[in-house]
Image (tube, rainbow, N blue to C red):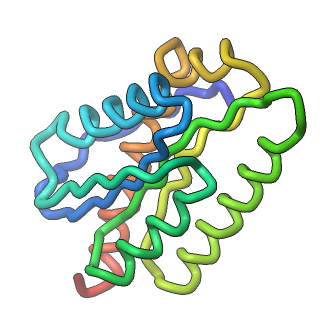
Amino acid sequence: MSEDNPLFSPIDPSPFSIGIIAAQYNSKLSQALLDRVQDILQENGSPKEMLVERVPGSHEVPAGLKMLLGAKTFSCLIGLGVVIKGSTSHHHLVADSAGNAIQSLVVEHGTPIINGIIVTEDLVSAEERIIGAIDRGKEFAHAALQMAKLNMKWTLI
């Protein structure tokens, strides 16, 4: 992941319906990431709707997103999770399969989905990206607002 800090213009969230699926695994960090995303989404007002559902881990995030897509229309969805390398390379399997599944959902449904699954080699790197100097939660929230705005511009929601 880049350590670039993009600049974001404020976007009024009030016309948007945002759905968030957040993994519970690595609970302290995943909750901090979810909290940050919600705070930023509400920074300039509140979205018309902000629905949050929890799933066990990052591997289940795409299934949760699929359920939301089947139930109603959203301006944008966000999938959140924290995957930290353990003693095996299982973290690559989880990250790759979740990322591919999320991208497939975007293509299949035409709804923007922000892949907010943080994947790191160690706990320190995860903390830096979630509760430290690299604010990925802020980036994910702003990306969702930008994509919701683009979605509204080019589709009839």
- The residue sitting at 19% across, 34% down in the picture is 43
* 48 shown above or below 143: below
Across and down, in percent, residue 87 comes to 87, 27
* 9 shown above or below 58: above
Across and down, in percent, residue 93 comes to 81, 52
* 64 shown above or below 80: below
- The residue sitting at 55% across, 76% down in the picture is 105
Residue furthest right as drawn: 88
* 154 shown above or below 77: below
Across and down, in percent, residue 148 comes to 33, 63
Across and down, in percent, residue 16 comes to 20, 63
Q: Quadrant of the N terminus?
A: top right
Quadrant of the rendered structure where residue 107 is? Answer: bottom right
Q: How many marks?
A: 0
- The residue sitting at 55% across, 53% down in the picture is 115
- The residue sitting at 25% across, 87% down in the picture is 156
Q: Quadrant of the C terminus?
A: bottom left
Name the side, left or right, on which 89 lies relative to 61. Answer: right
Quadrant of the rendered structure where residue 108 is? Answer: bottom right
Name the side, left or right, on which 39 lies relative to 108. Answer: left
Which of these two is toward me, 118 or 112?
118
Which of these two is toward me, 26 or 81?
26
Name the side, left or right, on which 54 lies relative to 52. Answer: right
Which of these two is toward me, 122 or 128?
122
